[in-house]
Amino acid sequence: MNFDHSHKRVRDAGEQAASLHDWDQRYEQLSAGRFEGVVDELRVGPVQVFAERANQTVMQAGRVCANRVSVALVRAAQAPGWFGGHRLQGEQLIGVSAQGEFDLVAGADMQILALSVDLTALRELVAQVDGPDAELPPVPLLLHASRAACTEYGLLLNAALGLSPGQTDLGAHPAARRMLALSLSEALLRCLRSGEPAGALPASSASRRRIVARARQYMQAHAHEVIAVPDLCQAIGTSRRALQYAFEEVMQISPVTYLRAMRLNQVRTELRQNPHTPVGEVAARWGFWHPSRFSSDYRAMFGELPSATRAPRQPS
């Protein structure tokens, strides 16, 4: 049974998204300023535990690997977050399965402490404990759990993340690794069984989430084009006021601000992937035609000039 631990400090939202195994996800930085993120990850057998945090508001979208189930404890800081249309404040448990994509707006300094388990191993555990005909509990988006349950879950996951190879010889003892994986798997099952699923979204919130989802899909498909708000309203069949209210509730920013942030994130990704391509060429490809205005907007968003992003990074 494998036992791997990693600790990463990153300076880019896309780099943070790529730091985790078994997740297909995209991150977009939404708030302005230099990005600083931290990701700790432990993998032991069929189990993955990770903690992540960033100093900027980040839009996270994607899915967990097809054969995994995850339950995460999110701790919102001053800025609230949103998950699947539900507002996140304080401590809450959220669930992610491979049945569809998730969308999470993680406010600045929100801590995400997550446990992910291989679906086959989880089903085997359920069969052993509850009998061969028992089924895996459903995975709701949001679980209402007691403060004590959230605290216990967080303490267990933090304790597991503290077992780095340099601090323990756990990796040399298969029995200990197996018991650790079993304890974590049982904790995930307890969350699914004891947490009460959150109720359905109010009609207004569900409608606004659908508006944002359709708008983001259209923006991403036409990111290279000049998109004005009237064009967007016509394309997704909504009014300017409804579009504005939807983005302000779900994303905490206006649709125009989000569109600019999305395009700036696309430029940043391309500059990091193709450091020898001229900055002006990449910027123009994403619709930024005014060089000095683009540089100013980019620096305000990411805390550095585009040329600094393109420059090869020195080993840390």
Image (tube, rainbow, N blue to C red):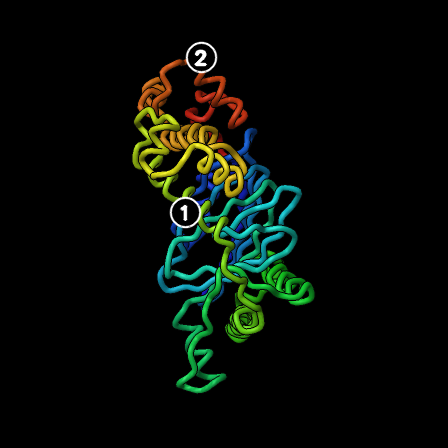
Q: What's the amino acid at mark 2? A: Ser
Q: Tag 1 or tag 2, which sits nearer the N-term?
A: 1
Q: CA distance from mark 2 to mark 1?
A: 36 Å
- Which numbered dot is residue 59? none
Counting from the top left corner in percent of width and height, residue 97 is at 42, 61
Which quadrant holds residue 187? bottom right
Question: Would you call the spot at circle 2 few (<14 residues within 10 Å), some (14-19), or many (20 or more)?
Answer: few
- Which numbered dot is residue 210? 1
Between 233 and 166, which is closer to the camera in this rendering? 233
Extreme residue in the right direction: 148
Counting from the top left corner in percent of width and height, residue 113 is at 57, 55
Question: Would you call the spot at circle 1 few (<14 residues within 10 Å), some (14-19), or many (20 or more)?
Answer: few
Q: Secondary structure at mark 2?
A: helix
Between 133 and 10, which is closer to the camera in this rendering? 133
Counting from the top left corner in percent of width and height, residue 169 is at 58, 65
> Would residue 75 appear left or right of 316 to someone viewing this image?
right
Question: Which residue is found at the position 53% from the left and 68% from the top?
Answer: 172
Residue occupied by mark 2:
292
> Would residue 208 appear left or right of 112 to someone viewing this image?
left
Between 65 and 44, which is closer to the camera in this rendering? 65
Q: Is residue 263 above or below residue 28?
A: above
Q: What's the amino acid at mark 1? A: Arg
Question: Is residue 41 at least partly visible in the picture?
Answer: yes
